[in-house]
Image (cartoon, rainbow, N blue to C red):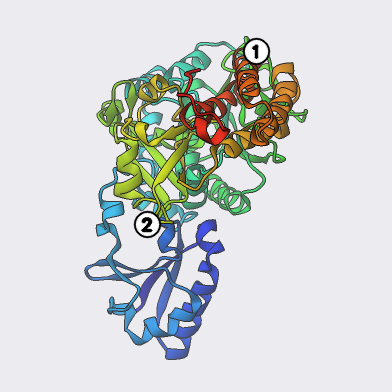
Amino acid sequence: MTITVYVPNDSSAVSLGADRVAKAITAEAERRGLSIRLVRNGSFGMYWLEPLVEVVTGQGRVGYGPVQASDVTSLFDANFLQGGTHALSLGIVEDLPYLKKQQRLTFARIGKTSPTCLDDYLAYDGYRGLAHALAMSQADIVKAVTDSGLRGRGGAAFPTGIKWNTVLNTDADQKYIICNADEGDSGTFSDRMVMEGDPFVLIEGMTIAGIAVGATQGYIYLRVEYPHAHIALNTAIANAYQVGYLGEDIQGSGKTFHLEVRLGAGAYICGEETSLMESLEGKRGLVRFKPPLPAIRGLFGKPTVVNNVISLASVPIILDKGGDYYRDFGMGRSRGTLPLQLAGNIKHAGLVELAFGLTLRELLYDFGGGSASGRPIKAVQVGGPLGAYLPESQFDTPLDYEAFAAQWTVLGHGGVVVFDDTVDMAKMAKYSMEFCAIESCGKCTPCRIGSTRGYEVMDEIINGHNVEYNAKLLRDLCNTLLNGSLCALGGMTPYPVLSALNHFPKDFGIDEPAQVA
């Protein structure tokens, strides 16, 4: 009897030795004359357990982890192919509390399937959303997305349905769908996990978007630092073309949608949608003035939908189960689920997909298990390198766009970076200014010059030079950046800087109570 064994090919798992583990399992099975079928799957996002090896048994998929190549012989000795007990035994993987407590909609397949196998995708409800979309009018598709309450999962949280409706109702001889896959925020990896672990869900979502608004060409703008995702996407796209899920006559519907991957060159600014379009057009990545909006005059001057990976990957389940189904998850104006990424000084680093409404404290301790160092958590940065630093007093804030905005912070892409009580928040604020100075496109003066001056002022503060005066100067400079920058790179750099200054003044050598910005 042939036994199926799963070993992730997710790049994080590979970096921890998954390829070596897969090779060792195959070699050991051959040496013992055992018949196995080795499948390379995506990761469930429990990175403290990677490489996670699963064996299909009569009771379910039994997990072992973290497994290294040196553990493989002892696993075979323990009869792990029949679910035998071993020091690395985890039991049935889907019953692990970290997974069982989640609400996986966008990530429903990731970890369960072979990423580029179309048969696997179809077996787990793949392309059902597209089938429904092909039987609907364009307006009804857009209405379903609008009714779902889906908002952009990349930062601004703009309602997806409104953007699609604008493109639908703008006349043009050509329209485009762009997936912003330039995932550059610190502590974020959900886009990468989708593209490496379930690329068809992104392809399906983009195809539905194209049909909805009348766009016949799509581009995935992928960050160059994701070579594994690049391979997975191109393989899946080729497979989709081969069986008619992309091309001139999608599944005999007469609808057309073409898709290709374009690599960015490593500029953080190209995560901003207008800079991204400049780059796609072969130009330097500079921010455009708005208006006109990309939905009216975007790529090559044509109406363009620009959404990020998670937004587009959420579309298939909305078209499969209906907008009301998706809207029933979440709270307030934040509907559906958000893949949250735990990184930094955290015991259980990984991905958690849950409906909006969970508190940051529940995420950090119920899922993250507290700090990896065992020390108290002092600060958490949510929303990437431009996100604010939240102190412990704000850990009970629900994960909701409006609740975060009320605290003068952003939920953004859902990246959560954790720091224990040994962190120096003044140095973290200095890093934020340095990051902006390095990554600025240079088009507007507040960002180009202000970030460099901010870095210099932070140096003065950290070195104890005229701290009170320089702290006031820093606030004035942040006010200029906040209100005068052309895009969110300069406009949001004050968030981490001022939050650090307000909540952790002693790290700046200031004893007085925090001054609210």
Residue 175 coordinates in the image, percent (x, y)? 59, 21
N-terminal of the two: label 1 or label 2?
Answer: 2
Q: Residue 484 has which mark?
A: 1
Give the secondary structure at mark 1. Answer: helix
**Residue 483 location, x and y as percent?**
60, 12
Give the foreground label among 1 and 2: 1
**Label 2 Cα crowd, 10 Å radius (few <14 / some 14-19 / many 20+):** many
Which percent across, then down, holds residue 498?
54, 25
Residue farthest toward the bottom in the current orientation of the protein: 32
Estimate the spatial distance between the alpha carbons at disc 1 and disc 2, rounded to whole Å: 47 Å
Q: Can you tell which quarter of the image residue 507 is in?
A: top right
- Nearer-the-camera pick, 409 or 63: 409
Pick whichever, 426 or 413, lies toward us.
Answer: 426
Marks 1/2 in contact by CB < 8 Å: the verdict is no
- Disc 1 crowd rating (10 Å Cα; few below 14, some 14-19, many 20+) is some
Q: Is residue 477 left or right of residue 35?
A: right
At a point 42% along the width and 90% down the height, the residue shown is 32
Looking at the picture, how far across and down is residue 392, in whole percent?
37, 36
Q: Is residue 16 above or below residue 268?
A: below
Q: Is residue 360 visible?
A: yes
In the image, what residue type sits under mark 2? Answer: Lys
Q: Residue 435 appears in which quarter of the rendering? A: top right
**What residue do we see at 51% from left, 30% from top?**
505
Query: Furthest residue to the left?
Result: 59
Q: Which residue is mark 2?
A: 112
State the residue in front, 137 or 347.
347
The amino acid type of the residue labelled 1 equals Gly
